[in-house]
Amino acid sequence: MIKQTLFTVVLLITLGVFVWSVFRLRAFFKLTKPAYPIKNISARITRTLNVAFGQSKIFRKPIIGFMHALVFWGFLVITLGSIEMVFDGLLGSDRSFAFMGAFYDVIMASGDVFAFIILVFIIFFIIRRNFMNISRFKGVEITPKTNLDAQLSLYFIGFLMLSLLLFNLGYISNHSNEVLGVYPVSSKIIQWTSMDFGALQESGWWVHILLIFIFANYLPYSKHFHVFLSIPNVFLSNLEPLTKYPNLESITKEVKLMLDPDAAYDESEEVTRFGVKDIEDVTWRNYMDSLACTQCGRCTDVCPANITGKRLSPRKIFVDLRHRMNEKGALLIQGKEDAKSLIRDYISEEEIWACTSCNACAQECPIEISHPNLIMDMRRYLVMEEASAPAGLNAMFANIENNGAPWQYSPEDRMKWAE
């Protein structure tokens, strides 16, 4: 009874903190603008099964992709066992899902095997991050704090797997004559060592469940928030072709007013900003992308601008957006402002104009983030609000305005460009 009471108190505290974090993020989302409508559910389900659950984009790097996919699939299986632990803690029972029979045996066996595999892979990932010179783990956006966050997340996952294995070892030792479920790895360890791990059952259970609760509340403030958001992010992704950029509704409205001589301008309407200058101009989708970003660096790794030495890092764009929302979002909720903005204080004009809009970053992203859409919206702000663009573009804009074409010839001399 004491265990049940203590567990219930800990669970309620965990849920309370998590709900507070969710409402904090909800308040930030309310500061953003609408995006595209969520339609064509069948196509979204297909994409989610392929990209999120099937991890199809991850396999573009076959070896490390396969390892990451196994970690992801293992987490899905182990989550089922973690749900059982919550029920056991609330009910004061032991193996409360054992009534599932053969299916339970498969889940427990898979969880035991995956716990060992993930633990081995996490050790490799820690060594890889600390001692192997991986270029995409570097960049101005990968600060010491970011690197520490990545390290902490890996250690969290590693200790989660270790505590699960210790719990399984203790359970088998204490129930050698009536083991519920199948535990291939733990059984082999007991067989090889001939040790009694019975004392580890209770401590392993508590360590594992407490680590789950702590990790769940750490994730909303970590780059590993993609543990929760990667699947929803893929499901809610834009189904339009990557190269199709949406028109600004405000621009469409202005053009219609200009073309209709009978249209009357409603002066009571609030004047909207063209493009994106700061976080209140981005869409909910842009902000969700920033939260879901795994900071894996695959986007930056394939960016032709970055490869050729330019300042643009597609990953940095969304890291900056997340940081800026954390900074200014809290101020806006309190009715305050600051003198900074996303453009220039976080993202320079040089970065914005370096993008070739090739969409290699969006194609590579394993969770369907669209970097060029946000970059194009920032360009729209610079051009339409500040008339700030590179000299070559300004010349083209002037030619279009004067001649109706990008070239410096009048319509009557249009073919002179060919000469």
Image: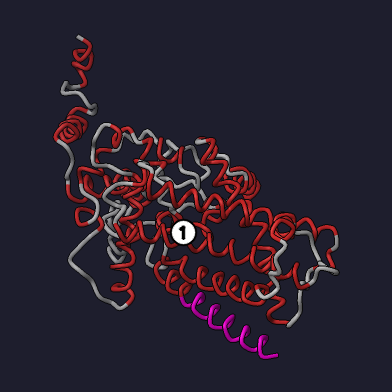
Is 18 magenta? The answer is yes
126 and 307: which one is in front? Answer: 126
Residue 105 locus on image (x, y percent): 80, 59
- Is disc 1 placed on a helix, strand or loop? helix
For the C terminus, the image quarter is top left
Residue 247 visible, this orientation: no
Vertical order, 334 against 318 (above or below)? below
Label 1 neighbour load within 10 Å: few <14, some 14-19, many 20+: many
Which color mode does the image show? secondary structure
Image check: 237 left or right of 361?
right
**Residue nearest the viewer, comparing 118 with 97:** 118
Q: Which residues are magenta?
A: 1-20
Of residues 412 and 130, the one drawn nearer to the viewer in this rendering: 130
By secondary structure, the bulk of the magenta-drawn segment is best described as: helix
* Residue at horizontal 56 percent and vertical 44 percent from the top: 67
What residue occupies the far front of the structure in this picture?
A: 194
- Find residue 201 and report its horizontal and vertical position in percent: 68, 73
Q: Inspect this view and state whether residue 353 appears.
A: yes
Which quadrant holds residue 74?
bottom right
Tell me which corner region of the image, top left, top right, bottom left or bottom right, holds residue 271: bottom left
- The residue where tag 1 is placed is 224
**What residue is rendered at 45% in x and 52% in y?**
126
Q: Is residue 151 left or right of residue 195?
A: left
> Which residue ends up furthest to the top in the rendered image?
419
Q: What amino acid does circle 1 point to?
A: His
Instruction: Decide whether residue 210 is among the magenta residues.
Output: no
Q: Residue at x 22, y 45 (%)?
A: 383
The residue nearer to you, when weighing 344 against 148, is 148
Task: Residue 115 in the image: state x and y as whole percent.
Answer: 63, 57
Q: Position of residue 150 (x, y in %)?
A: 41, 57
> As drawn, is 37 to the left or to the right of 372?
right
